[in-house]
Image: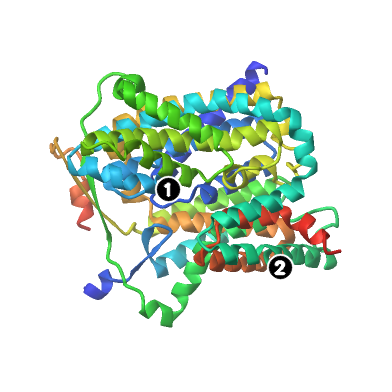
């Protein structure tokens, strides 16, 4: 358990897991560069494909990888309408 | 400007504001790394220069407004520029007043924007008569800029010593590509080297972390604990001149004037300096923090806008830390923009100001009203659903693609080389600005040895 928790490092101002970072980079680079290379048309089409690929890669990595942040909300109106508490325990 | 262009400007500004409201909140994002690749990509896509300028101005205003928000609600900086504000924000957060610091900061930002735009125009028109003379000495000026920034760096000797060698690295790669006939002789590789320098520190730390021996010596961390304080819902339209008292308006306005006039200096440095000077003598911690926050946000915003606008209007060469970093795409993104043909040459000063006003106004309207109301919800969303890994991955993807686009497969390795060298230098106290200046000065500087 403690081993699982203490595997993060600080890079660019936030905590990340190295394995997840490498996965995210691999996904994004594959989609961006892949999009650029497979685009059939003339410039600027490869760039458009590449950028779309980058966005797709970003969305996929956001789904696959969980942020390493423990978010707690404290405040005046605890009416249960927000679910931050529930999610932060996962 | 006809109505179609104005419509496009409005759409581009709205997109810029929404996108950079989210990116601004994500912790730790560096301004150059998040703004430059996207701007450059838009330029290369062939968008009209009006649209690109509107997008950029809106993006920078939105990012500036929002990157101080996580400071207020969670005590972590949303960007390099907001780091100096953490201390003052924490004072207000501990007193249970996070919404006060958000209001003070974003109102300061609004004032900074309102001051910086007209004043930049004025300063630019004073410089304009000398512009031709200045641009004919561009190489020399960039070299002197590198020397100047080297003397401001944490490690002055190394920064000075590296000027020629780093120039050799850049020109060496360019000549290699020409020699291998990968790029035509009239094309100078720029964008990927620029981005290599930008992501250098991240790439360098990443390779350090992949080294097991190094990793074992590091303190491993658990999940980042973030506590968000929910503020009160705001009723009605917020008005910066009501949120700030007269003195705070006065101080953030005069701070913004100084920030504009010192457009050629480091924005972070000026922010820290001015924030300290104007708040040092105040005893009451809440009053001190409020004044420091509103002024500092005004200064950063003004420094960013003036650093972009003055060189853009007056000279067309990136002669400020801002222009050489985050705004680089507006000055140089070959083959579309070059130092001889960029937004400075394509748009008249009046057009630049009109587009800037539209971009800034839309960002202020969207971002200012939205963040004052929903600050804690937006932060909660970004912190919970946007993993830091995906953001780094996205920028890595963009850099690799642009490197490939510049000079094929070999340039991915060339860019990696530049990134590793710059990361190493950065780690040892060489300022980003020094390396950017060398990148611009290199052809002239090494030409001296020929």
Residue B351 shown left or right of residue B152 in the figure? right
Visible in this render: residue B201? yes
Looking at the image, which residue is at 55% across and 26% down? B117
In the picture, which quadrant includes the C terminus of chain B? bottom right
Residue A35 can be seen in this image? no
Q: Chain of mark 1?
A: B
Q: Residue at the location (72% across, 56% down)?
A: B406
> Which one is closest to the eye, mark 1 or mark 2?
1
Q: Is B377 situated above or below A16?
A: above
Marks 1 and 2 share the same chain: yes
B355, above or below B392, in the image = above
The residue carrying mark 2 is B410
Instruction: Answer whether labels 1 and 2 touch (C-beta < 8 Å).
Output: no
Quarter where residue B235 is shown: top left
Q: Where does the image place residue B350, in percent across and percent down from the top left? A: 66, 21
Alpha carbons under labels 1 and 2: distance apart:
32 Å
Give the SS element for disc 1.
loop
Quick check: B413 left or right of A42? left
Secondary structure state at the residue bearing disc 2: helix
Residue B143: x and y in percent read 70, 53
Residue designated by label 1: B79
- Say few, some or many: other residues with alpha carbon within 10 Å of mark 2 (under 14 / 14 to 19 / 20 or more): some
């Amino acid at each position: 358990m403690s081993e699982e928790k203490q595997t993060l490092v600080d890079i660019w101002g936030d905590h990340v897991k190295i394995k997840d970072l490498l996965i995210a980079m691999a996904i994004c680079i594959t989609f961006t560069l892949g999009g650029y290379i497979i685009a059939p048309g003339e410039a600027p089409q490869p760039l458009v494909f590449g950028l779309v690929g980058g966005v797709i890669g970003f969305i996929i990595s956001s789904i696959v990888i969980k942020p390493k942040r423990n978010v707690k909300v404290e405040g005046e109106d605890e009416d249960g309408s927000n679910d931050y508490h529930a999610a932060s325990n996962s | 400007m006809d109505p179609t262009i104005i419509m496009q400007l409005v759409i581009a500004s709205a997109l810029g504001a929404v996108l950079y409201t989210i990116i601004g909140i994500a912790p730790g994002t560096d301004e150059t790394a998040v703004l430059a690749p996207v701007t450059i990509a838009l330029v290369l896509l062939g968008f009209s220069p009006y649209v690109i300028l509107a997008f950029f101005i809106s993006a920078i205003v939105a990012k500036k407004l929002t990157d101080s928000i996580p400071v207020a609600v969670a005590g972590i900086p949303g960007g390099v520029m907001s780091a100096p504000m953490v201390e003052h924000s924490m004072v207000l957060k501990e007193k249970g007043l996070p919404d006060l610091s958000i209001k003070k900061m974003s109102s300061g930002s609004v004032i900074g924007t309102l001051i910086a735009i007209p004043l930049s125009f004025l300063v630019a028109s004073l410089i304009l008569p000398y512009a031709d003379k200045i641009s004919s000495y561009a190489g020399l000026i960039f070299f002197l800029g590198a020397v100047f920034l080297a003397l401001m760096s944490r490690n002055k000797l190394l920064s000075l010593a590296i000027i020629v060698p780093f120039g050799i690295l850049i020109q060496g790669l360019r000549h290699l590509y020409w020699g291998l006939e990968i790029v035509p002789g009239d094309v100078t590789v720029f964008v990927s080297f620029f981005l290599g320098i930008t992501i250098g520190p991240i790439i360098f730390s990443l390779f350090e972390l992949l080294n097991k021996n190094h990793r074992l010596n590091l303190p491993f961390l658990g999940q980042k604990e973030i506590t968000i304080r929910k503020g009160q819902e705001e009723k009605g339209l917020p008005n910066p001149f009501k949120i700030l008292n007269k003195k705070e308006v006065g101080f953030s306005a005069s701070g913004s004037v100084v920030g504009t006039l010192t457009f050629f200096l480091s924005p972070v440095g000026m922010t820290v300096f001015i924030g300290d000077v104007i708040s040092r003598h105040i005893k009451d911690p809440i009053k001190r923090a409020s004044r420091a926050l509103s002024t500092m946000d005004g200064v950063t915003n003004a420094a960013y806008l003036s650093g972009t606008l003055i060189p853009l209007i007056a000279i067309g060469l990136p002669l400020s830390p801002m222009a050489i970093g985050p705004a680089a795409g507006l000055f140089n993104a070959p083959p579309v923009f070059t130092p001889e043909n960029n937004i400075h040459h394509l748009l008249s000063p009046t057009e630049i100001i009109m587009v800037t006003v539209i971009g800034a106004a839309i960002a202020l309207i969207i971002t200012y009203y939205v963040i004052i109301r929903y600050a804690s919800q937006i932060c909660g969303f970004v912190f919970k659903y946007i993993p830091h890994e995906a953001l780094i991955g996205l920028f890595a993807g963009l850099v690799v693609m642009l490197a490939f686009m510049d000079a094929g497969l070999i340039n991915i390795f060339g860019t990696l080389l530049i990134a590793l060298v710059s990361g190493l230098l950065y780690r040892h106290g060489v300022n980003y600005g020094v390396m950017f200046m060398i990148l611009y000065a290199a052809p002239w500087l090494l030409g001296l040895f020929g």
